[in-house]
Image (spheres, rainbow, N blue to C red):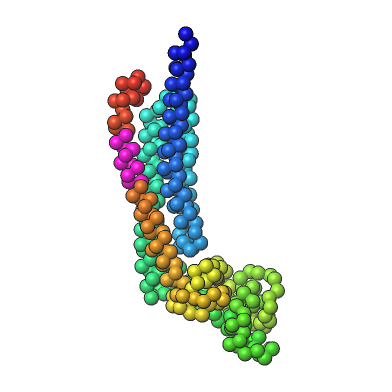
Amino acid sequence: RWRPAIRGRRCRRSARLGRRVREASRQFSRQVPMCNLLIMARSTEVAYFTMVEFYYVVAVIPVIILVTHFVHMQRGAPNKVAMAVTLIVPSLLLLACGNRQYMQAVSMTDRLAASDCNAMPQKQKLQQAWEAAHDLWMGCLNETSTLYGYDVATLQRSFRIQDCDEYLDAAGANSRSRLSRSTRGTGSYLGYAEEWAYLRYLEENHFCGGWCTPRVQLWSHVRSKDSCSNAVADVFGWYVQPHAAEVCSVMVVTFTVSAIVLVLLGPIMRKSGFDW
């Protein structure tokens, strides 16, 4: 006598489980592209040239999915408007962000790889920052050579710019360094702390030297292979560009499939007795 009731409860549990699986699948398909966009935008090589805050708009996607889940739980049945918003809005949002990131990657690859240091303001400022750092480093080495009698070439092989007090002062550090403090002021070197931190990261992680053209390394002892501008151009060209294009492709397919599903689902839901 009680077997039909058990089967009924099992059917209801299966239906709820099916809804949760479908919602989890929709969430997963959007979370992966969302994470890819945020990871690329926040990467150190890219973030200097990108307004990272713009890509935080994709954080609204989990909120949309969560609200849709609560609407379905509250109603105990699928809701047409909630499903349409959850399927279409995140796809369009990710497509717009992915397209923006792709177009920026194409533009940045060309401009960073170009020999012209004035191709854009950020590139020009990084070149100025590198030249200021080089002047500071050479001044520090020359003064140390005068004070202690060491050959400048020997000091170049043994020390880097972060060993100079002048650099620490200009970059905002307060700790003592191993080389002598210059009697000259560091006013002409102020204002480059962010650029110097960026150039140092590139030297230490991408084995590059100089900015627009290959030059001596100022922060790292690792042997350089190319200019840091070309290294960043490779990041945009070989990392950001293909991944952003992949996000756009996935979102175009997702949007198309979602639209087809919504159209085909209407008659089925109405036939099953749902308000659709």
Q: Can the viewer see residue 55?
A: no
Q: Is residue 271 left or right of residue 183?
A: left
Image coordinates for residue 127, horizontal then vertical, percent: 47, 74
Residue 275, picture quadrant: top left
At x 45%, y 36%, the residue is 24
Say which residue appears at 65% left-offset and 89% top-offset: 150
Q: Position of residue 185 (x, y in %)?
A: 64, 79
* Residue range corresponding to the magenta coloring: 251-261
Rendered view: 54 above or below 266:
below
The quadrant the C terminus occupies is: top left
**Outermost residue to the top:** 1
Q: Quadrant of residue 184?
A: bottom right
Residue 112 or residue 265, whichever sits in front: 265
Q: Quick check: 122 left or right of 135?
A: left
Quarter of image, res 254: top left
Is the residue 190 above or below the residue 90 in the image? below
Tell me: 45 left or right of 149.
left
Q: Find residue 268 and report its horizontal and vertical position in percent.
A: 31, 25
